[in-house]
Amino acid sequence: MTKTLVEKILSGKQAKIKVTNTTEVAIIIQDSPIPLSATCTASACERKINGGGSSSSSTSGSGSSSGNSDTKSHVWIVIAACGAFILLLILCGFTCSYCLTASIERQQTEDVEAELRQFTSQTASKLEFSHVSCYADTGQLLSMEYLLSSKSKCILHKVSGSASRGQVLGLLGPSGSGKTTLLNALAAVENGLSQFTGELLLDDKRLTNGYRRIAAYVQQDDSLYSTLTVRECISYSAQLRLCATLSDKVKNAMVDRVIAELNLSHIANSRIGSAGGNSGQRGVSGGERRRVSIGMELVISPRILILDEPTSGLDSSSAHSVVQLLKDLAGHGRIVILSIHQPSARSFLLLDKIMLLGKGKLLYSGGPAESKKYFQDLGFKCPKHENIADFILDIASDSRNIPMIRCHMKQEPTEPAKVSSRSCTHLQNIPPQLAIDSPMAQSETLPLMEEDLSLDTPRVNNLLASPVESARFEEPRTDELPAPLPAAVAETRMDAIGIAMKTPSHSILIEIRVLFVRTAQNILRHRSLLVLHIALSLSLALFGGLIFNHVTNDLAGFQNRMGAFYFILTFFGFASMSSMDLFISERPIFLRETGAMYYGAFSYFLAKATLDTLLLRILPASLFASIFYWIMGLQASTARFLLFSLTLVLFNVAAGAICLLVGVLSRRVGSANLVATVVLLVMLLFGGFLLNSQTMPTSVCWLKHLSVFSYAFEILMTNELKGLILKFDAPGYPAVPVYGEVYLKTLGMDYANRYYDVVALALIAVSLQVLAFLFLTLQVPLHRDIAEHDEDDDLSSPHEEVEV
C-alpha cells in the first residue's frame, strides 16, 4: 500500500488507543473504509492490514458488537409490539363476538313456529308509483354539445302505475325502453349517475330509505359464488339479512322451506358452479341458478318482489317454469313486479297485468289478453297466429308509433284496459278486505279459453300447506266477506312495517363473522390460487437458495446479495397482482348484495382484505424467508433473520395493497393488469438497484419515496451488509478488505434508515388499503327516496329524451 493511500485513509480519522500491556499499545483507526490497526512495541510501530485476523476481530468486536445488540433489542421490541397488538385485536374480536352471540341467544326462543308467525305477520297490500321520471346527468352522456346545453337527458318519462298484493305486474318493451330503469326506481336503487323524480307509495304512505328491508330486488345477472352449494347460498343470505333475534332453528327452517318452495330440494347440496362450466364443475342449470337467486331474496319473506328479466337466457320451458313460480309466489300475499323480454304466449298470459314501455314512455297498462284488442282498435293489425307479446313489442319498437299512441292515451281518462277475469279468480287466495279494495275486484271480465285459466293446483296447495305461508297469510272464508279494514288496524299494520324498515337486522360483528366464514370457505374450496402461491414460494425458496448457496464475502458475494434481494422483491411484487382479482371478479356479487343490504362495504372489505393478507401475502412470504435465508447463508443472526422476514411480509402486503387499489378502480382484468404492471415497473426502476439514487435527475428523484421496492431493498441490504467485511478483489489487484457500509454508501443507503423504512412500508400498506376501501364505498348502490314530482312539469316539458 502506498504512502499516499495510507495518508488519505488516515486523514481526518479518529484513532482509538488501547494499552494491551506494559510494552504494547494498540491503535485502532475509527471510521476507516478498510479494517486498519497498528501495534506499537517499545516505541517502534509496525502497521499491519488484517483481513479477518485478530485485529479485525477486535475492531469489529468493539465497533459492531454494540450495534448488533442494539439491533437485536430494537427488532425484538418492534416484533413483540406488533405481535401483541395483533393478538389483542384478535382477542377483542372474539370477545365481542362471543358476548354478542351469547346476548342474542339469551333472547331467542326454541318455539320455531311462533317465531315464524311473528316474523312473517306483516304484509303490504298495494304499491303505487306516480309520474316516475329519470334524468341522466352523467359522464357517459357528456359531449361538447351536452355541456353547452341546459337540457337534461330524460330516460324515463312520467310513468305511473300500481301493483296489488297477489298480482304479477309485467313490464314489457324493446331494449332501451326503460324497463330496468323503472325497476331501479321501484326498488329505490340509484347508481349515482341519474336522478329520479316522482312519487312512490306503499299502502298510501310514502316510502323511506329502509324500504329495501321489506322489498327484494332480483337483478338480471345471477351473480353467485360458484364454490358454494344451493343451501349455503340461501343460508348465508338468511344469516346476513334476517333479524339477529331469530334463532338458528328458525333461520334453518326458513331456508329449508324456501328450498322446498322453489323445488330445489334435489340439488340443495350441489355446488352452483359456473355458467358454461368455465371454472371446472358445471354445477346447476340456468333455470336452477335463477331460482337460487330468487330464493336468496325470498328467505327474508319480502312483501314486494321485484325481478329484472328473470327469464333472460333460459329456454322456453325453464322461462315458463320461472313465471309460473312467480305466479304461485304472488298467490301467497306478495306483490310481484318483473320485466320480461319476448315472453312465450303461455308465459305472457300468466301475467295479471302488463305495462308496455317505449323509449321511456308508457304505451299501455292493463290485462295482457286485452292488449291485442286495444292496439287493434288503434289501427294495428295482429297477424293470425302471432304471439300477442311479439305483436305489441313490434309496435313499441317503431318510434313512429309512439306519438300517436301517447296522444290516444291523453284522451283516455282511465287505463286503456282492465284486468282480466283470470286475475279475479286469482284473488281467491287474497284476504277479502284486500280483494274489496283491489281495482282487480272491480274490473270488467272478458271470457278466456279454459287453458288460460289453468293453474298448478297441487303445487299451490302444497305451498299453502307450508306453515311459513300460512303464518304469513291467513285467509278467511271467501263467502264471509268482512267490512273493509278499519283505519286504526291499517295504521297499526303500517306502523309495524315502518318499524321493520327502520330497524337494522343485525350488528356489524355478525356481518364480519359470517363474511369471514364464507370468504374462507370460498378460498379453501377454490384452493388453486392459495396452493399456487405457497407452492411457488416454497419451490423458489429452495431453487433460489441453492443457486445463491453459501454466498461468499467478496465482490462477487456482494453482487449476488444485491441480485438475490432484488429478485425476491420482483417475484413478490408481481405475484401480488393476484390481489386485483379480489374485487374485479366479485364486483357483481358485491354490488348485488350491498344493494340488497346484505352487509356494509366495511364488513365485506375487512373480511376479504384480511384473509387475502393472511393467506396470500403473509403466509407465502414467511415460508419463503424461513427457507431461503438459511440456505443462501446470510448472516446467522436471529434478529437479522426476523427483520428479513418482516421486510418481505410488509413488502408483499404493500405490493398487494397497490394491486388491490388498482383492482378496485378497474372494471376489467385486462386494463387492471396493464396499469398494475406499469406502476410496478416504475417502482422497480426507482428501487435503488437499476438506478443509483444519487444520480437520479432532480425532477424525478421524488419518485423513489413512492417506491415500495426502495424501502424494502434498503432494509435488506443494510440488514445484511452492516458490520460485514467484504474483500474487494478486483482482477489483477490485491484483495482489500472493505466494510459493508462502504458499499451501502455507494448505493446511497444508510443503516440508520431501517426502522424508518419499516414504518414507511407499513404506512403505505395501510394507506392504500384505506384508499381502496374508500373507493369501494363509492361503488355501493345508493338507497334514496324518489324526489318529489313537480306538478308543473307536464308531458310537453322540454327535457330532451334519450334511449336507455
Image (cartoon, helix red, strand yellow):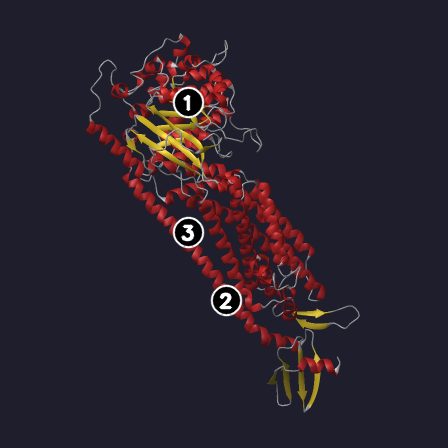
| Whole-number angstrom distance, CA of label 2 to CA of label 3 | 24 Å
Q: Which mark is residue 90?
A: 3
- Circle nearer the N terminus (1, 3): 3
Give the residue pinned by disc 2.
74
Residue kind at label 1, given as amino acid type:
Arg
Which is more toward the observer, 153 or 189? 153
Q: Residue 130 lies in what quarter of the image?
A: top left
31 shown above or below 470: below
Q: Label 3: how many residues lie within 10 Å, few (<14), some (14-19) or many (20+)?
A: few
- Circle nearer the N terminus (2, 3): 2
Q: Secondary structure at mark 3?
A: helix
Q: Residue at x 37, y 39 (%)?
A: 784
Q: Residue at x 46, y 57 (%)?
A: 83
How many numbered marks are there?
3
Look at the image and tell me in which quarter the N terminus lies. Answer: bottom right
| Whole-number angstrom distance, CA of label 1 to CA of label 2 | 80 Å
Camera-near label (1 vs 3) is 1
672 shown above or below 791: below
Residue kind at label 2, given as amino acid type:
His
Percent of width and height locating residue 309: 46, 26
Percent of width and height locating residue 356: 43, 22
Camera-near label (1 vs 2) is 1
Give the residue pinned by disc 1.
406
Q: Is residue 317 left or right of residue 722?
A: left
Q: Residue 374 lies in what quarter of the image?
A: top left
| Whole-number angstrom distance, CA of label 1 to CA of label 3 | 64 Å
Q: Secondary structure at mark 2?
A: helix
- Circle nearer the N terminus (1, 2): 2
596 shown above or below 354: below
